Amino acid sequence: MIRMKSNEITLIESRRGKPMLQMGEYRYYKHSSNREGHPKVLWVCVKWCIGCRSSIKTFENQVISINGTHKHERKNLS
């Protein structure tokens, strides 16, 4: 689990076995890292393709920034 202040971010796995982050009811997929094995990663909202530009940057599994606001409704995970 990755923690930052009051936001709890959990590393989860997609249905296809890929790493994802979950913060509250929002999910993020791994968009890029500088190179294979590099600890700096950009995670983007799963709704990026419809214009949501919310993102999370991590370095060595620590959150270094959370950017943008979501442009869509939260997904009900219950």
Image (cartoon, grey):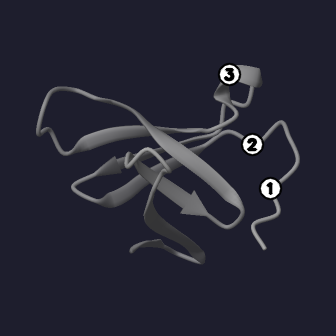
Q: CA distance from mark 2 to mark 3?
A: 15 Å
Callout 2: SS: loop
> Disc 1 residue type?
Lys
**Mark 1–mark 3 contact, CB under 8 Å?**
no
Q: Residue at x 72, y 62 (%)?
A: 25
User: Closer to the N terminus: mark 1 or mark 2?
Assistant: 2
Query: Which residue in the protein does label 2 denote?
Result: 69
Could you tell me how far apart the alpha carbons at marks 1 and 3 are, in whole angstroms?
16 Å
The residue carrying pointer 2 sits among few (fewer than 14), some (14 to 19) or many (20 or more) residues within 10 Å by Cα, namely: few
Left/right placement of residue 33 relative to residue 56 reads: left
Disc 2 residue type (three-letter): Thr
The residue most toward the left is 37
> Local crowd at mark 3 within 10 Å, few (<14), some, or many (≥20)?
few
Residue lying furthest front in this view? 16
Nearest to N terminus: mark 2 or mark 3? 3
Q: Residues within 10 Å of mark 1 (few under 14, many from 20)?
A: few
Q: Is residue 34 above or below residue 11?
A: above
- Residue 9: percent from left, percent from top: 51, 67
**Could you say where residue 38 lies in the image, as x and y percent from the top left?**
14, 38
Q: Determine whether, in the image, residue 27 is placed left or right of residue 20.
A: right
Question: What residue did someone put label 3 on?
Answer: 49
Quadrant of image for the N terminus = bottom left
Marks 1/2: CA–CA distance: 15 Å
* SS label for mark 1: loop
Position of residue 74 measured from the top left corner of the image (x, y, whole percent): 82, 54
Mark 1, residue position: 75
